[in-house]
Structures are given as C-alpha cells and as structure tokens.
Image (cartoon, rainbow, N blue to C red):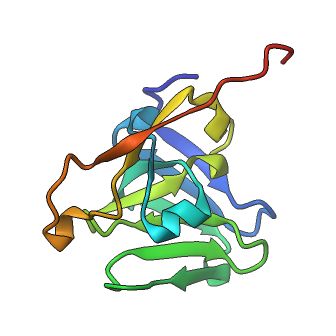
Amino acid sequence: MDLDRKDFNGACHCGTIRFRVHLSEGLRSARRCSCSMCRMRGAVAVTAKVGDLEITAGADALTLYQFNTLVARHYFCSQCGIYTHHQRRSNPSQLGVNVACLEGVSPFDFSAVTVNDGVNHPTDGKAGSGLAGVLRFEPASDR
C-alpha cells in the first residue's frame, strides 16, 4: 500500500454515491475517534480539505446526519447506509473520508491506526493529549 498516494476514486457499498478525492496527507492521516458517533460507526478515516472531494454521482442520495453541537456533518448513502465522509468538528475546513470507500483500500490494510480522543474534544475546552490509543490489526497466520 502506498501511504503517500493522494488521489482516489471512491464509492459507497451499492455504488449510488461515487466521488473523487484528493487526500491532503495521503493515507498517512488514517485514524479513528472515540466519540459516541465514531465508536458506533467504527470507520477508519483519512483527511481531505473541504473542496477536494467531488461527488461525481448520487449527490441526491447523500443523507446528512448531525448531533450535539451540529458542527460536524456526517454523510451517508440513503440506499445502502454506508458512511462516505464527514466535515470535521475539530477542523471544519477538513473532511474525514471513509477509507473503506476508496478504491483499492481496506481498513485492514493498516496494521495500526491512531485513535483520537473524541470524548474529551479539544473544542470543548477539555485538556488532554488528544490521543485515546492505537487500534491494531494482526492478520491470522493462515491468511
């Protein structure tokens, strides 16, 4: 896997939502978050700037979900329910893009993924390291 690759095509599970994206840090920004939404969603996200993700098909099928402060904007396919991307609360000029939606990329391609502390969110004025931990994937030896 080329961690420095920055340009990808992507889609939701059913293919209704299709997009092109330029990742500002390539795949090196892969992360998870411990906030209530991300804990339940379970996705690995990478960073793109707002404006660097172009919906090429299915924009009318995107569904927006917001909660709590209503700053973050979470987008899902209304047909298959897959989370494709979100506008970040911690930096609204950035998007988090679901790596599982990127062609040729799987969340299981990453042996270790940083988990950000979303429970003690920096915009809430809570102090902390910003790091909740690291999630590791170890493939079975017979794979």
Question: Left or right: where does residue 11 sit relative to residue 13?
Answer: left
Residue 81's quadrant in the figure?
Answer: bottom right
User: Where is 138 relative to 117, above or below?
Assistant: above
Viewer-proximal residue, 51 or 37? 37
Q: Which residue is depicted at the point 68% across and 57% down?
A: 11
- Residue 13 percent location from the top left of the image: 77, 60
Residue 93's quadrant in the figure?
Answer: bottom left
Residue 137 shows in the view: yes
User: Which quarter of the rendering shows the C terminus?
Assistant: top right
User: Which quarter of the rendering shows the N terminus?
Assistant: top right
Question: Left or right: where does residue 10 sit relative to residue 133?
Answer: right
Quick one: which residue is furthest to the top in this view? 141
Viewer-proximal residue, 79 or 108? 108
Number of numbered discs overlaid on the protein picture: 0
User: Where is 104 relative to 54, above or below?
Assistant: above
User: Where is 20 relative to 65, above or below?
Assistant: above
Question: Left or right: where does residue 90 sit relative to residue 82?
Answer: left
Q: Which residue is depicted at the point 35% across and 38% down?
A: 25
- Residue 74 percent location from the top left of the image: 49, 74
Residue 105 shows in the view: no
- Residue 40 percent location from the top left of the image: 59, 65
- Residue 141 percent location from the top left of the image: 79, 14
